[in-house]
Image (cartoon, rainbow, N blue to C red):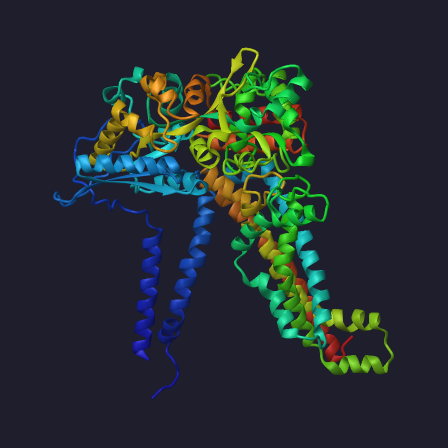
């Protein structure tokens, strides 16, 4: 009796996952690309092929340029601050800290709650007239900024909420990276009388970098798609906070232009893939460098 | 092993089958009424009403979609009455305002809508009419109701498309206008009255002009005491700031543009329009903190919590205000500027879906005709937030004295003005919200914002032609 599985049984095992992948990922992707080449409307009607007209409209649209700038600024600020603060928190929690499990749990709560619910809570907290924060500031006789209406503060508020929500994620990954560094390396450095800064610069940071890079990659791709916070805090049509995803929502559900919205979807996808590819290459290089160092190669 | 393989293949087939079903457009599934060959007249793009089979003995059902608010509860009560009369299950399905528009137009994307009637915004008319979503009621409406019995501006803005064409795609359901509510207790306070007299050498009374409104707002603005003059609709959610600004724009001599030529430049960026936006923005000085972004749901709160003397909103929201404030609140129509006086249109019209079977459309017509009868309208105006377009009722003393806001409402109907109702209305609203918002937030000067907006509007309108 042959124990070698037949080709048919191999396909049989793979088929459920493959068909799910086709139905849930590949079909929507290709259907979206098809829609982006049509004049599809949200409320139906005849769908006509329009070639790349939607892409021409998109790149000529001032709203697109503004949304792209807003998204890039958002990603830059939020991910940078989250990375730095998360890493600093991880460093301070690496060693023995009193009630460490409790502290960790409390710090992780924002990350574990539903972003939409949190956004609505923040909307109540930051409200200019009846928000808890301004009531508190007023009681302390401090200025009461209009967090959600002041054009200079709206965007800042969204970035701050995102930082509050996602810094624990960066901290968690950083902590995992820090804990993975073997203790003996630090002991060897101490024997060599290396200073704290030198240890951090030459051991901690480089050895943590691959995992930290992965965390940045995950956060950056997620932040590129920012939608829920913007919707809950300022709505999809606020010029100062309109991200690409919010613009996409506006185009599809308010302007009913499904074809143009699909083109937005493709552009966002390409942006996410581009960022992800850059990071993956960077991570590969880091890992290759680390491998060479460990093998003692030049 | 073979069993596993077969099972796997079966799972794959089922998964792909489900995906295919999910991606397919929904087929008509309405079983509410028997089919009929006699389809009513429809717009040029309208498809024939879907036909299907149903058990003849089934009780008929009428589904109306509207936003979630007090008038919809009143409509449900009337629908129950209609249901008893006609042996019909009449339901008013209420959708939160934030999702109402999205859900309605997504529903229109199907072969058959779940609703027979939608109580849609006046701005939706062009889209509903030109995309073949709304049934053309031009031939039927005059047979159901004497058009002269309806307030002409309500009929024009809530039912007609294109405006002035005498083509109807809706019938007035909730006729509303923008007005002002004010703290009557503050206005009638003898101390306030004498202080106002001493400062401005005139009596503190309900303002007749925008300039008087500004003076009163300035008088009541006392940030130290957390008291302010006025709050206006400045929210950026949907059309809040557009409707808030519209009546000032028209009163000062500006306009959205010419609906016939679609020319916007010279009207929306005229010196009069710039002056209007300057004035509108200037009023923010007398608003409480956060006054530059107050939507429909928030604008009346400062009046209730004693932080503002006056608040602008739609009359449909005023019954709730009276419930909270009692005799402390009073109402007045939009002020004038010179001899120009305008109030932004509110409310919605009944439109019949072209994507339901013909018998459902007939049932919908029957309901609308019954709703527009004067006797039904008399019941409608007694419902919370139920406002009518019936000219006879509007003129009657009984109506004007029935509530503290009815007289101001009846007066406001002669001042109605609406935004564009063309198919691309939403793009026009979105850009207006952004540009007016930028002017209110100080990111652009009123002149710059309106100049950009006029160019943007012309571009959108021309692209849609």
Position of residue A245 measured from the top left corner of the image (x, y, whole percent) = 54, 47
Label total for image: 0
- In this view of the protein, which residue sits in the foreground, B103 or A265? B103
In the foreground, A213 or B308: B308
In the rendered view, tell whether residue B176 sits above or below residue A17.
Answer: above
Q: Residue at x 83, y 72 (%)?
A: A196
The image quarter containing residue B20 is bottom left
Quadrant, the N terminus of chain B: bottom left
Is A37 left or right of B219, judged from the image as shown?
A: left
Quarter of the figure with residue B373: top left
Residue A77 visible, this orientation: yes
The spot of residue B444 in percent (x, y) is 67, 30
Q: Is residue B28 above or below residue A19?
A: above
Where B148 sits versus B465, above or below? above
Q: Residue at x 30, y 78 (%)?
A: B2
Q: Residue furthest front?
A: B190
Indicate left or right for A175 with B310 as reference: right
Name, please, the residue furthest toward the left. Answer: B57
Residue furthest out toward the bottom = A1
- The image shows residue B179 at horizontal and vertical percentages of 49, 25
Q: Position of residue A298 (x, y in %)?
A: 78, 75
Tell me where residue B120 sits by quadrant.
top left
The reply to whether residue B166 is visible in this rendering is no
The answer to which of A66 and B443 lies nearer the viewer is B443
Looking at the image, the residue that sits furthest to the top is B339
């Amino acid at each position: 009796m042959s124990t070698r599985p037949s080709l048919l049984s191999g396909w049989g095992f793979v088929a459920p996952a493959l068909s799910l992948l086709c139905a849930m990922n590949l079909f929507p992707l290709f259907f979206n690309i098809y829609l982006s080449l049509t004049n599809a409307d949200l409320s139906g009607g005849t769908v006509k092929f329009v070639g790349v007209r939607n892409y021409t409209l998109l790149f000529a649209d001032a709203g697109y340029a503004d949304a792209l700038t807003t998204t890039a600024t958002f990603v830059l600020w939020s991910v940078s601050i989250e990375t730095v603060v998360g890493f600093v928190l991880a460093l301070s929690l690496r060693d023995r800290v009193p009630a460490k499990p409790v502290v960790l749990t409390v710090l992780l709560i924002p990350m574990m709650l539903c972003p939409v619910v949190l956004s609505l809570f923040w909307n109540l907290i930051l409200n200019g007239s009846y928000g808890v924060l301004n009531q508190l500031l007023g009681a302390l006789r401090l200025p009461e900024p209009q967090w959600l209406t002041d054009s200079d503060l709206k965007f800042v508020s969204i970035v701050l909420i995102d930082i509050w929500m996602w810094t624990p994620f960066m901290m968690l990954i950083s902590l995992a990276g820090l804990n993975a560094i073997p203790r003996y390396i630090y002991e060897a450095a101490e024997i060599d009388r290396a200073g704290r800064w030198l240890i951090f610069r030459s051991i901690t940071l480089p050895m943590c970098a691959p995992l930290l890079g992965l965390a940045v990659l995950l956060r950056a791709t997620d932040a590129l798609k920012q939608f829920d916070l913007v919707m809950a805090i300022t709505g999809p049509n606020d010029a100062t906070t309109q991200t690409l995803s919010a613009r996409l929502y506006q185009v599809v559900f308010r302007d009913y232009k499904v074809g143009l919205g699909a083109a937005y979807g493709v552009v966002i996808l390409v942006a996410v893939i581009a960022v992800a590819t850059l990071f993956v290459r960077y991570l590969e290089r880091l890992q290759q460098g680390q491998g060479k160092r460990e093998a003692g190669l030049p | 092993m073979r069993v596993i393989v077969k099972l796997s293949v079966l799972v794959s087939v089922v998964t792909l089958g489900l995906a295919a079903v999910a991606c397919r457009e929904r087929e008509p599934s309405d079983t509410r009424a028997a089919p009929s060959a006699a389809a009513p007249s429809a717009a040029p793009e309208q498809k024939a009403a879907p036909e299907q089979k149903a058990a003849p003995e089934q009780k008929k059902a009428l589904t109306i979609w509207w936003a979630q608010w007090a008038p919809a509860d009143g409509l449900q009560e009337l629908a129950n009455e209609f249901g008893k009369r006609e042996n019909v299950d009449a339901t008013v399905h209420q959708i939160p305002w934030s999702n109402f528009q999205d859900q309605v137009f997504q529903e229109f994307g199907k072969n058959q809508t779940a609703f027979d009637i939608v109580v849609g915004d006046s701005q939706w008319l062009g889209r509903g009419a030109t995309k073949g979503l709304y049934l053309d009621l031009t031939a039927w409406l005059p047979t159901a109701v004497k058009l002269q019995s309806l307030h002409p501006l309500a009929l024009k803005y809530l039912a007609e498309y294109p405006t002035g064409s005498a083509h109807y795609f809706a019938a007035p359901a909730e006729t509303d206008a923008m007005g002002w509510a004010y703290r009557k207790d503050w206005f009638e306070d003898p101390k306030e009255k004498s202080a106002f007299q001493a400062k401005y050498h005139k009596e503190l009374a309900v303002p007749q002009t925008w300039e008087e409104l500004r003076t009163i707002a300035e008088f009541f603005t006392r940030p130290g005491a957390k008291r302010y003059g006025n709050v206006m609709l400045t929210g950026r959610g949907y059309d809040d700031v557009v409707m808030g600004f519209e009546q000032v724009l028209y009163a000062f001599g500006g306009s959205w543009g010419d609906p016939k030529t679609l020319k916007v430049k010279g009207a929306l960026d005229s010196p009069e329009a710039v002056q209007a936006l300057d004035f509108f923005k200037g009023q923010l000085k007398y608003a409480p903190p956060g006054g530059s972004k107050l939507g429909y749901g928030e604008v009346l709160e400062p009046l209730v919590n004693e932080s503002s003397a006056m608040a602008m909103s739609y009359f449909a929201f005023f019954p709730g205000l009276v419930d909270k404030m009692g005799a402390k609140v009073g109402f007045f129509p939009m002020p004038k500027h010179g001899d120009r006086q305008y109030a932004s249109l509110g409310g919605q019209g009944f439109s019949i879906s072209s994507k339901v079977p013909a018998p459902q459309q007939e049932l919908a017509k029957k309901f609308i005709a019954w709703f527009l009868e004067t006797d039904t309208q008399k019941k409608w105006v007694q419902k919370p937030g139920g406002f009518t377009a019936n000219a006879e009722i509007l003129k009657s003393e009984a109506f004007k004295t029935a509530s503290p806001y009815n007289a101001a409402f009846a007066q406001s109907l002669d001042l109605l003005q609406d935004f564009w109702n063309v198919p691309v209305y939403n793009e026009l609203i979105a850009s207006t919200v952004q540009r007016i918002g930028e002017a209110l937030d100080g990111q652009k000067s009123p002149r710059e914002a309106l100049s950009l907006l006029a160019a943007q509007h012309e571009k959108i309108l021309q692209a849609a032609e």
